[in-house]
Structures are given as C-alpha cells and as structure tokens.
Image (tube, grey):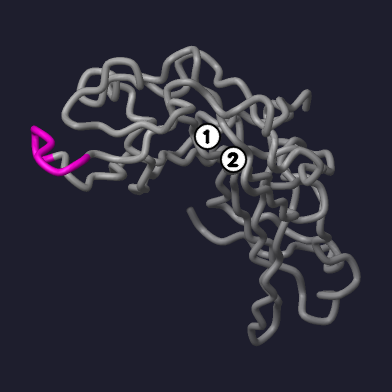
C-alpha cells in the first residue's frame, strides 16, 4: 500500500498503511505502526508511552523510535498488550544430574535390604543407619555410596498489569497442577528457587518463577513449608 502524506493538519500524526497486531496462545498482543508528521510539528504531539494501538486499545505503546527525513519525521512504534490478565503461563523444563545417597534410592531395599535383613554385604549400625556396602558385595556394589538422579527444574513465565511480589515464598514448596509435567506423580511437589519481574513499557510486567522438582516422595515437609501464595 502507498504511503500516506500528513495531509492538511500538519500537527496531526498520520498512521501509515502496514500496521500490525498479533495475538498468540498466551493471550498476549504484539504490534507495530508507523506515523508520519511534518518536521516542524514533530514534537507537538508525539506518540507517548502507554498510548493505545489505533485499532485495539488493549495494546499499548512500549517503545518509540524517531526517524528523521528531509521534510518529515517518522515515528516507528511498538505495542504490547493482554487479552487476559494475567496471561496464560508458559512452562519450560530443563534438567541436570545430581548425586544422592544410595540408601535413598527407591529400590534400595531390593539390593541393600534392611538392618534386620541386609543384602549384598550391606552394613548398618546399631540404630539401623546404613554405613556402606562391604567387600565382596554383589552387583558391583562394593564401595558404592551414591547414585545419579535427575534434578528437573521448572520455569513459569506470564504477563500481568499488576506488580507481583514473589520474594516472600522462595524456599517454600508448591503442589504441581495436574497435567503440567507429564509423568510426575501426585506425591511430588516443587521447591521455589527464584523469582524475577521486569516492566514491559508502563502498563505491563513479565513475571518468572523457577522451581526444583522433588523426588518421588516430595520435599521434606518438616524442612520446607508449603506456600499459600
């Protein structure tokens, strides 16, 4: 489409053809637009942070770039908005390996036994505390004291128009919503390890929380309090 001139009223910004506005599955809007105004009137009424998109007031200006030409100025404007507040959260997952004591292995009883019925030369003290596997233990268990297990982390990100305070429950646990992570048992929960928030323009905030997934039995409730947030 052809560029529009700024017309008779030189102090009026003229919206140019080619503006955009997109919505994705997270209920967020992104868009762009270009305005042209006569050079002598460029600063009379410029686009302002927080002004609405000309075709959807739910999207607001978050960035403005001024481009100078011979007789006019271009304003390249970026928009962001929400069709639901807060937006639909996005979950991402990543994992690493960590070493855990061998006696915490979910199948330990099958290869280590108990204090009353030890297996594979497992040694326990008088209080039933596992001390290690002795010489000649079967299944190559001699000297084994730990095992590697996955430590999945969860990152949850969403957008909102409200200031969200998320520092107070770092170190607390949360129940995991059904279906969020395939294969996670109902006994597992997540320990909140990090929180961050950053402004998007004047009207919106991007919020991120990070969690560490527990083992099969969940985080110890004596040590880690369940969050009510």
Residue at horizontal 71 percent and vertical 36 percent from the top: 56
State left or right for residue 116 relative to residue 174: left
Q: Is residue 25 above or below residue 164?
A: above
Nearest to the observer: residue 168 or residue 200:
168
Point out the tag, 2 or 1, that comes first from the N-terminus: 1
Q: Residue at x 47, y 22 (%)?
A: 180
Magenta span has 135?
A: yes
Mark 1: few/some/many CA within 10 Å (<14, 14-19, 20+): some
Residue 189 colored in magenta in the image: no
CA separation in Å, label 2 and label 1: 5 Å
Q: Residues within 10 Å of mark 2 (few under 14, many from 20)?
A: some
Residue on which the image places disc 1: 90
- Residue found at the far right of this picture: 44
Q: Position of residue 117 (x, y in %)?
A: 27, 16
In the depicted structure, whether residue 141 falls above or below residue 50: above
Q: Are marks 2 and 1 in contact (CB under 8 Å)?
A: yes
Residue at the spot of label 2: 157
Label 2 secondary element: strand
């Amino acid at each position: 489409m052809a560029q529009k001139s700024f017309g008779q009223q030189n102090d009026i910004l003229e919206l140019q053809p080619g503006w955009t506005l997109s919505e994705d599955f997270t209920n967020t809007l992104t868009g762009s637009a270009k305005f042209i105004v006569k050079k002598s009137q460029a600063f009379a009424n410029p686009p302002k942070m927080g002004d609405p998109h000309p075709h959807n007031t739910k999207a607001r200006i978050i960035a403005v770039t001024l481009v100078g030409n011979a007789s006019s100025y271009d304003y390249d404007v970026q928009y962001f908005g929400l069709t639901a507040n807060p937006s639909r959260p996005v979950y991402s997952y990543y994992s690493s390996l960590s070493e855990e004591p061998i006696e915490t292995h979910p199948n330990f009883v099958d290869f280590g036994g108990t204090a009353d019925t030890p297996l594979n030369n497992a040694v326990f003290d008088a209080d039933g505390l596992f001390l290690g596997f002795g010489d000649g233990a079967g299944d190559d268990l001699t000297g084994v004291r730990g095992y590697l297990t996955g430590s999945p982390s969860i990152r949850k990100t969403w957008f909102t128009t409200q200031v969200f305070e998320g520092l107070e429950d770092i170190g607390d646990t949360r129940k995991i919503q059904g279906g969020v992570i395939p294969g996670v048992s109902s006994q597992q929960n997540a320990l909140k390890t990090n929180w961050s928030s950053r402004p998007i323009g004047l009207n919106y905030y991007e919020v991120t929380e990070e969690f560490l997934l527990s083992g099969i039995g969940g985080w110890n409730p004596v040590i880690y309090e369940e969050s009510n947030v």
